[in-house]
Image (cartoon, coloured by chain):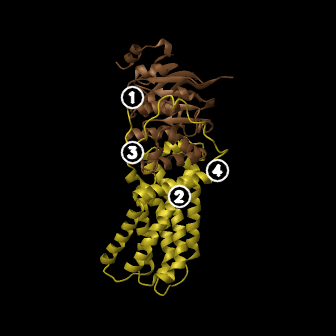
Amino acid sequence: MSTAAIEVDGLARHYGEREALSGVSLALEQGQTLVVFGPNGAGKTTLLRVLATLLRPHEGEVRVLGSRVPEESWAVRGRIGLLGHEPLLYRELTARENLSFHARLHGVMPERIEQVLTAVRMGDRAEEPLRTLSRGMVQRVAVARAVLHDPELLLLDEPRSNLDPAAVELVEPLIGAASGRTRVICSHDPGGGLAEADLVLGLREGQAAMLAPAAAVDAEAVAELYR
Amino acid sequence: MSATIPGAQPIASPERTAEAPPAAPRRRTTPTWSVVRALLRKELLVELRTLESVPGMALFAVTTFVVFHFALQRNSIDGDEAAGILWVTLLFAAILGINRLFVADADQGGFDGFALAPVDRSAMLFAKVLALLAYLIVLELIAVPAFGLLLLGPPLGHALPDLLGVLALGDLGIAAIGTLIAAIAVRTRARDLLGPLLALPLLVPIAIGAARASSPLLALGHAGSPAARWLLMLGLYDLVFGLIAYALFDFLLED
């Protein structure tokens, strides 16, 4: 029985005439971390959204947590935590109301809300509408939202953006290697990204320009992707 | 660690935060009705805090009645004329709410958040229909008495019991069609234009049926009960578009 958390073979996805992804293949074992590098518009976010079952692949085979996407997407929804550029939170609701809403959607008991609010140190600001919080605080609530239902797979798009160094330390147990979850991380930080990667994927113009174990990749090779 | 986050408690050292919180205690299933309630609560909370839909709808209706009051240069209207003005005004006021129904979800990632959850997609349809129904009821609590005061000749009290039934049937259709069209329009760039353009042709039969059914109720001397065939037509139209919305809504949420 395969232990692969993610299997992608010949994935292509386009928006109208423009190919966002073309012929991307990879396999990631459970508990491992894939870090995706690439310049803006290389297809990183599209790849995350396909893996999150939010976008349909136009070509190729995609399996996430053992289920084919999109045919069996229903089986993996609820097992994925997505932290993208948008926090997926309502600005007019408080942090607690937002998390309570997502807890209902995922069938999570209310006591979990306190756990994650405490973990991101937002308990004392939990009753304020999100629109009144700083971007860093909203990002911390978004981290809490992404792990609220204890997902097996985390899809993280520049997860530490907007976070100061102290907050980065704070969310580490939730979304870092210590969380023990399988992770796919989009990053522009060669040093930090390589440090937490088991596997590295470099995307350029929608194609896989690099796919290698992290140990075989250095920061200079990653920097080359951006030239 | 010296960095601090404004307004937050001091951040714990890495030693204290080295362990993730325990796994989420999970209910066995998430019943659809529980999800509908959560979505509806969210919907009403957002509207209560932003007041983006209902006040605009009510203000539009009342302003329209004031304009009619002066434009018609008559002290009162009744019968067909009254029913037509009432329903056309309610219809256009409803369009304002329909246009805003999914805006927060589209602009703030609500669709993605919902799509990632292991729940029946139709829960969002039910919640949105209920939310739009609630908006229409509040609209009519304000607009119908204003109509009675500003334009209607016969006393509104006599017509009210039967009129409530016609309003309920009209509202159900507007809510079902409005939710379906709003879900289509919100994903387009020209959503403010496309919503009304798609919705109005589908809502016209409701305006016709509801106006015909209301006409005898608003006639001088309260001429009788609403014709059964118009009530039946409204009920069937509601049912058909309710089923169409139910059948199509899942696909509208997919990529």
Q: Are marks 2 and 3 on the same chain?
A: no
* Mark 2 vs mark 1, CA separation in Å: 38 Å
**Is tag 1's residue or tag 3's residue first in the polypeptide sequence?**
1
Q: Are marks 4 and 1 on the same chain?
A: no
Q: What label does residue A133 carry, if any?
A: 3
* Mark 2 vs mark 3, CA separation in Å: 31 Å
Q: Amino acid at mark 1?
A: Gly
Residue A102 position by quadrant = top right
**Is tag 2's residue or tag 4's residue first in the polypeptide sequence?**
4
Q: Nearer the viewer, mark 3 or mark 4?
A: 3
* Mark 2 vs mark 4, CA separation in Å: 18 Å
* Mark 4 vs mark 1, CA separation in Å: 40 Å
Q: Are there few (<14), some (14-19), or many (20+) residues within 10 Å of tag 4?
A: some
Query: Which chain is depicted brown?
Result: A
Q: Are there few (<14), some (14-19), or many (20+) residues within 10 Å of tag 3?
A: some
Query: Which chain is depicted yellow?
Result: B
Q: Amino acid at mark 4?
A: Pro
Residue at image mark 4? B31
Residue at image mark 1? A41
